[in-house]
Image (cartoon, rainbow, N blue to C red):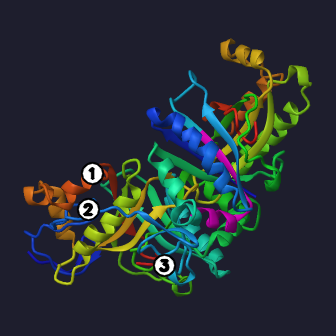
Amino acid sequence: MLFMHETHRVIGRHAGDFEDLYREQWMGSLAEGDDARLVWYLNHAMGSGPSYQVVTITAVADGGAWERLAARMLTGDLSELAARLEAMRYEVEGKLLLPVAWSALQEVDLSAVPTDGAAHGLSLYMQDTGWPDAPLDDYIELWDADYWQVMRQTPPDKKLLDIQACFQVGHGSGIRPEAILMQKIMNVETLGGLLTRVERYDPTTWPGSYMAKGLEIRDQWESKLLRTSAWSPLW
Amino acid sequence: MEAEGVDHGVEFEGHRSEDQNSTGGDHPVSVSCPDIRRSNRPVRTRKGYIHIGAAPFGVAERGIVLFVHQVHQVVGTEAERFEDAFRQGWMGSLAEGSDARLLWYFDLAHGSGLAYRAVTVTGVADGVAWERLAERIAGGDLRSWARHLDGLQHGSTGRILTTLPWSPPPVALADVPTEATEREPVLYMEDTMWPFPGKLREYIAAAGAVYRPALGAEDAKMQMHIELALQTLPGAGRSPEVTLLQRLTSLPRLLHLLTNDLSEAVVGPGSWMHEALALRDQWRSKLLRTAPWSPLP
């Protein structure tokens, strides 16, 4: 399965209409086919980065389904809606993601993804995108052995993040080397501590040991705080 | 001034007068363009919306459907090994199958931009073939090659493109050479344009109706011609974005463009340069030189 990750720079005065169009028309029209579904609609949390930036992630059955989706958007039944969305943003930057072998998220049951736009609560995600100096495989293995395996054993009441997915960029559709973590924030108070605490890590204990080891692989990454919309199919 | 043949190590052909205005890329062409604002609205059919004159994306007879375009930031001390990795490894590996081929290997021409940048364009038959290739790299037989390449480049930025309806047809995959043959390098001007919000279709239609014919008119002495006209596919790069891969045929005309201001006739009202400002004002040109062994010249 592929995940089409798109970052939209929306024209501020059209932000409401942009989201409405996604919710009321795009999601349903996309679902008229059986091989692609919008799964996340996320707003970059105000105060933590660029204004009016939206991230959407669309689950696509396979490469053939992506080609069909692209054709629908360029010349087919989705082209009119695609043109209306295009008129409400400055640009969109897309990449096709593949789940890494140990990612908790591998497949999405497309038939079970909601398409009705029903309202629900909000969730906050931390999307980490990293660019290693070392081979990409080494970075993904570091995340597996020294981050994911430790984080998954953290007791729920002490857990800041739930790592829901890890991706690498499909060949030629974005940057290499690059890997991405989609992490749901489970405890906002703990996030507050992370934001306000002075960073001093003890290299003899985790997470300091991970931070020290990580510097052998990479020192450049970006965290984005993304808040699901009230109707995002996954949240 | 006329010029023909090999100059500065780059092969050129054709003739051109110094005082002719037609240059290239998304660049000045001395034509009027009364219909530049003509819309290209979709028309509803029983199969959904289509655009008049637009070939359906993915039609098999158009040959290659997907073009994987990558810009590589090469480690300077590894430049030769990097090129070898593509010539020996990538080109050969793809040749074992029938659904993907390395098409071009370019270097960004020295003195015209960032150092140690290589551009590769790989043709892929369709989305299924692309996914197969991506899986081979992520966890299959090409994984070790990709790991090797990670050590030879700081990184690469890729996007996946398809041809515009009015693009010259791409070469068939079966006709792409898979063994390195040495030839003189060829210079290309690659132009990438970013139309204003909501103007992508109008821009594509206008460029096809006005710009392309101006370059390809029978009585025009061409400085360059469009090899491929491309747009970035949804989910695989930036949009709105259009890329023209243009083969230069006159070095003197390029040097004239670089060393002279554009005349009023070229940039004034009624010209492509002027009227197209309603659709875009941002683009980037790159001068790319093919490697002597590049499968396509």
Residue B278 is tagged as: 1
Give the SS element for disc 1: helix
Q: Based on the displayed image, in which of its 4 quarters is residue B286 positioned?
A: bottom left
In the image, B28 versus A76, the foreground residue is A76
Name the chain under label 3.
B
**Where residue B53 sits: x, y (%)?**
41, 75
Say which residue appears at 66% left-offset and 49% top-offset.
Answer: A27
Name the chain under label 2.
B
Which residue in the structure is indicated by mark 3?
B295
**Where residue B202 sits: x, y (%)?**
35, 59
Q: Based on the displayed image, in which of its 4 quarters is residue A125 positioned?
A: top right
Asked whether the beta carbons under mark 2 and mark 1 sit within 8 Å of each other, the answer is yes
Instruction: Please state if B24 lies on the left or on the right of A226 as rendered.
Output: left
Q: Based on the displayed image, in which of its 4 quarters is residue B178 positioned?
A: bottom right
Q: Residue B73: say if magenta.
A: no
Q: Nearer the viewer, mark 3 or mark 2?
A: 2
Neighbour tally class for label 3: few under 14, some 14-19, many 20 plus, Cα within 10 Å? many
Whole-angstrom CA distance, mark 2 to mark 1, is 9 Å
Residue type at the position of mark 1: Ala
Asked whether the beta carbons under mark 1 and mark 3 sit within 8 Å of each other, the answer is no
Residue B36 is tagged as: 2
Say which residue appears at 27% left-offset and 59% top-offset.
Answer: B37
- Confirm whether circles 1 and 3 share one chain: yes
Q: Earlier in the sequence, mark 3 or mark 2?
A: 2
Image mark count: 3
- Confirm whether circles 2 and 1 share one chain: yes
Q: Residue A59: say if magenta.
A: yes
